[in-house]
Image (cartoon, grey):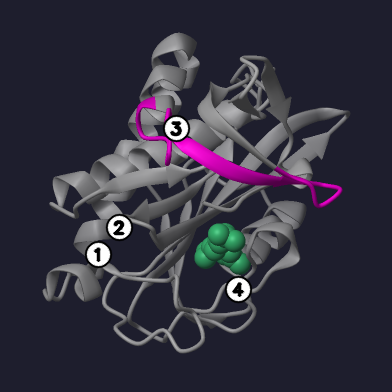
């Protein structure tokens, strides 16, 4: 495994993407940095992380040999890998808030941003970006954020956590290669936040409705059973989970 350790960079995802535009990148190359100056989150948000305290890294996956009919499987194995590592470190009440925020109780510990590189209309490579709050204690203006240290009071070795994450991620990608699709989805759904609990949602028009999260589709849409027992699926843009 090639690991590129940087002191500072705008974004590890952007770095890998640029690197791949002018040279071939070995499968499973990991880029990690002490500081991201322009960390990117989902849907155009900013990912802020205190210098040297947390893990901000990206993994390059050559997907040309993987059958990527459903890119969401990469998202599922990533979320499951992070959850499993956190459970191995005895972090309590880990769940995955659809599609791939990792929570402890109801606070966010980790965000995942997967970007696909297309060539001739197919996904040729994926860059899996992971931001995991490890030793940061103060999260100003982010009341819903937490870290391993904030939860357990311990200080963690970032390299040790990184190694455990990359190892589990590799196992997840092997499961895709081996086409263990049912197992992958079952493992992901087993960790879903508020699964089978009565929840309130807001749709794209701002209407509130209640339902029970049941699982996901292969495309990554959320399956919800509504009050009248009808199952509906929702894309990320069409839905907000309120509580
Ligand atoms: C989110 O929850 O909004 C996703 C956050 C993803 C953050 C990580 S940190 C490493 C990688 N580089 C980035 O610019 N973003 C991802």
Q: Which label is found at residue 159?
A: 1
Whether residue 52 is situated above or below residue 66 in the rendered picture: below
- Which residue occupies 45% across, 10% down? 182
Residue 67's place in the image compared with 224, above or below, is: above
CA gap between label 2 and label 4 equals 18 Å
Q: Are marks 1 and 3 in contact (CB under 8 Å)?
A: no
Name the disc covering residue 16, or none: none
User: Gap between marks 1 and 3, in whole Å?
Assistant: 21 Å
Which of discs 4 and 1 lies nearer the camera? The answer is 4
Q: Nearer the viewer, residue 15 or 83?
A: 83
Residue 162's tag is 2
**Residue 119 falls within the magenta-colored stretch:** no
Q: Check whether the beta carbons of the residues at disc 2 and disc 1 lie within 8 A of each other.
A: yes
Specify which label sits upstream in the sequence, 1 or 3. Answer: 3
> In which of the image's four quarters is ligand 1 placed?
bottom right
Q: Which of marks 4 and 1 is nearer the N terminus?
A: 4
As displayed, is residue 203 above or below residue 163? above
The Cα–Cα distance between marks 3 and 2, rounded to whole angstroms, is 16 Å
**24 vs 5: above or below:** above
Residue 41: percent from left, percent from top: 63, 64
- The label on residue 77 is 3
The mark lying in front, picked from 1 and 3, is 3
State the residue position of label 4: 39
Q: Of label 3 and label 4, which has the lower sequence position?
A: 4
Q: How crowded is mark 3: few (under 14 residues within 10 Å), some or many (20 or more)?
A: many
Can you see residue 56? yes
């Amino acid at each position: 495994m090639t690991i590129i350790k940087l002191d500072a960079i705008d974004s590890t995802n952007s770095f890998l993407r640029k690197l791949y535009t002018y040279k071939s990148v070995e499968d499973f190359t990991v880029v990690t940095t002490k500081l991201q100056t322009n960390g990117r989150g989902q849907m155009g948000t900013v990912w802020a992380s205190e210098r040297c305290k947390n893990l901000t890294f990206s993994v390059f996956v050559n997907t040309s040999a993987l059958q990527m009919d459903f890119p969401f499987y990469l998202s599922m194995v990533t979320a499951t890998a992070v959850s499993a590592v956190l459970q191995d470190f005895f972090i309590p009440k880990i769940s995955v808030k659809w599609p791939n925020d990792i929570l402890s109780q109801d606070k966010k510990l980790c965000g995942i941003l997967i970007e696909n590189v297309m060539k001739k209309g197919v996904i040729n490579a994926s860059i899996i970006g992971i931001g995991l709050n490890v030793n940061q204690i103060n999260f100003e203006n982010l009341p819903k954020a937490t870290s391993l240290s904030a939860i357990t009071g311990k200080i963690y070795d970032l390299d040790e956590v990184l190694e455990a994450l990359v190892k589990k991620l590799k196992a997840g990608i092997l499961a895709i290669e081996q086409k263990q699709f049912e197992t992958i989805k079952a493992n992901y759904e087993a960790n879903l936040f508020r699964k089978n609990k009565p929840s309130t949602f807001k749709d794209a028009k701002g209407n509130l409705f209640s339902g029970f999260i049941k699982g996901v589709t292969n495309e990554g849409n959320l399956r919800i059973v509504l009050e009248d027992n009808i199952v509906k699926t929702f894309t990320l843009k069409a839905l907000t989970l309120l509580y």
